[in-house]
Amino acid sequence: MNTKLTLSLDKDIIERAKSYAREHNVSLSFLVENLLLKIISDYKERNEHTGSIVKELSGIINLEGLDYKADYAKYLEEKYQ
């Protein structure tokens, strides 16, 4: 579903973009839409990869039988004695 969008841009940029669109036989709307899609997909990919190391390492350490709360409490007791 297409929706109208009003943008405020520098006049020179608009003219240059229109010229580029004409030379490539596409509409200005097409150019803007594809630019936005590129930005969105790059952003999504970057954010998906940000947590990938965590996903890869999840479950690699066996924490069964480990009482991390007791170990941390012991650490704090020794630190502040």
Image (cartoon, rainbow, N blue to C red):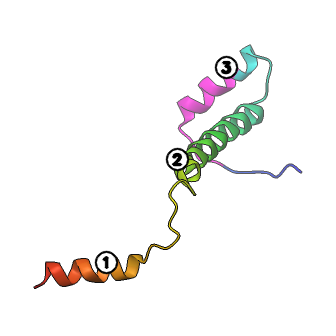
The residue that appears at 53% across and 51% down in the rendered structure is: 57
Residue 62 in the image: x percent, y percent? 52, 61
Q: Residue beneath label 2, please? A: 53
Question: What segment carries the magenta color?
Answer: 7-20
The residue that appears at 40% across and 75% down in the rendered structure is: 68
Could you tell me how far apart the alpha carbons at marks 2 and 1 are, in whole angstroms? 25 Å
| Secondary structure beneath label 3 | helix
Q: Is residue 70 left or right of residue 4?
A: left
- Height in image: 25 above or below 75? above
Q: What crowding class fits label 1: few (fewer than 14 Cα within 10 Å), some (14-19), or many (20 or more)?
A: few
| Quarter assignment of residue 59 | bottom right
Tag 2: amino acid: Ile
Q: Residue furthest right?
A: 1
Q: Residue beneath label 3, please? A: 20
Identify the image quadrant of the C terminus.
bottom left
Q: Earlier in the sequence, mark 2 or mark 1?
A: 2
Q: Residue beneath label 1, please? A: 72
Could you tell me how far apart the alpha carbons at marks 1 and 3 are, in whole angstroms? 63 Å
